[in-house]
Image (cartoon, rainbow, N blue to C red):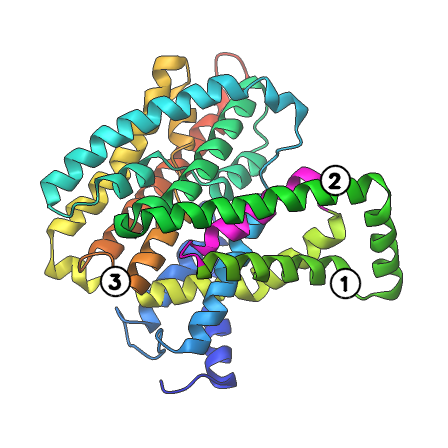
Amino acid sequence: MQGFGFDTLALLTAVGFAGPLLASLPRSRIPVIIGELIAGLVVGKTGFGVIDVANPTFQLLANIGFALVMFVVGTHVPVRCHEMRSAVPLALARVVLGGAVAVALGVGLAAEFGTGHAALYAVLMASSSAALALPVIDSLRLQGPRMLSVTAQIAIADAACIVLLPLVIDVRRTPTAALGALAVTGCAVVLFVLLRAVDRRGWLQRVHVYSEKHRVALELRTNLFVLFALAALAVSTHVSIMLAGFALGLVIAAVGEPRRLARQLFGITEGFFSPLFFVWLGASLQVRELGSHPKFILLGVSLGLGAVLAHCAGKLLGQPLTLAVLSAAQLGVPVAAATIGTEEHLLVTGEASALMFGALLTIACTSIAGALVARPDRRKGKQIR
């Protein structure tokens, strides 16, 4: 399809319905993004090729969607939960242990498949996805000290790997990426300090009341301005916009996200930009490459199972296996790796599809683990917690 107009937007919006439709199937437990990725595969490079993923307008809208998705993910991390603080030390120990196992597995996989991406594989397998796992925990109404611990573990692993990914995906740019990551993080810290000071003076509440009274959406406008500014900084310093979105989300979560802002972000992100991004990502992947390079099917399986194995190391520190597997869900980090790797031509042919295949396997394992955790304990007659 040449150009990018309203006909393309209509097509993408219609295709995006595949996510909710598949998720609505009884007992399927299929995440919405899986349907969107599949729809993208059908209309993109792997399928009929009816959309041009290289179109600059399409890429810009997709990047806005990526930044917003990571922003919303950051706002969902329960950094203000006081009960979670006591769970942080043990959660951190499990993250470190799982990271060590992931490093060993990453070195082995890189040597076996000859890609030279040991550090990238290690970060992927050590990562967790707050965007996937936390909604699963909430929807299943899982509670208790163990759930607080696994929630903290997921948040720590997700944040750490989001910071590490730009440093390992392209070793040649590691110094520049490190400085860029420090710049974005520093701006986020300064923003947090300013917002806390403004909040204590009551100015944020005044802005909120004025915005609601006059219906001008000042909170949304301000957050979008800051998000785009951080994204511009990230791009100029060769850092993924993933970090910009996630950092801003953490800041808003730490200060306290107004419900009105949450609803507005949910509307523009889940209603348009998020499905557009995931359709674009699916359309960008060339899954046929896996058929032409069968070894990358094995790489995807190895990455998925390796991630589960790395997180299962938490069993050594007293974590139930079901909760360990629940923490292994991957989304943001492999999506970013596939996106950056595809755009910058950093991955070998078929490798981006292998990364996504591995992530899908972890999502499947997490869905099963969540169902097992929520299953009533027949002996005790209550949920396993």
Give neighbour class at mark 1: few <14, some 14-19, many 20+ (Cα, 10 Å). some
Magenta span includes 13: no
Q: Which mark is residue 217?
A: 1
Which residue, given by chain and number where applicable, does mark 2 sit on?
A: 196
Q: CA distance from mark 1 to mark 3?
A: 39 Å
For the image, the number of numbered tags is 3
Of circles 1 and 3, the one toward us is 3
Query: Would you say the residues marked 2 and 3 are in contact, meaning their CB atoms lie under 8 Å apart?
Result: no
Of circles 2 and 1, the one toward us is 2
Which residue, given by chain and number where applicable, does mark 3 sit on?
A: 345
Lateral position of residue 76 relative to residue 177, left or right: right
Q: Residue at x 51, y 79 (%)?
A: 10
Q: Residue at x 30, y 35 (%)?
A: 307
Image location of residue 335, percent across then percent down: 38, 53
Residue range (magenta): 237-257
Q: Which comes sooner in the sequence, label 2 or label 1?
A: 2
Q: Which mark is residue 14?
A: none
| 170 in relation to 274, above or below | above
What amino acid does circle 1 point to? Ala
What amino acid does circle 2 point to? Arg
Give the camera-side residue of 110 and 27: 110
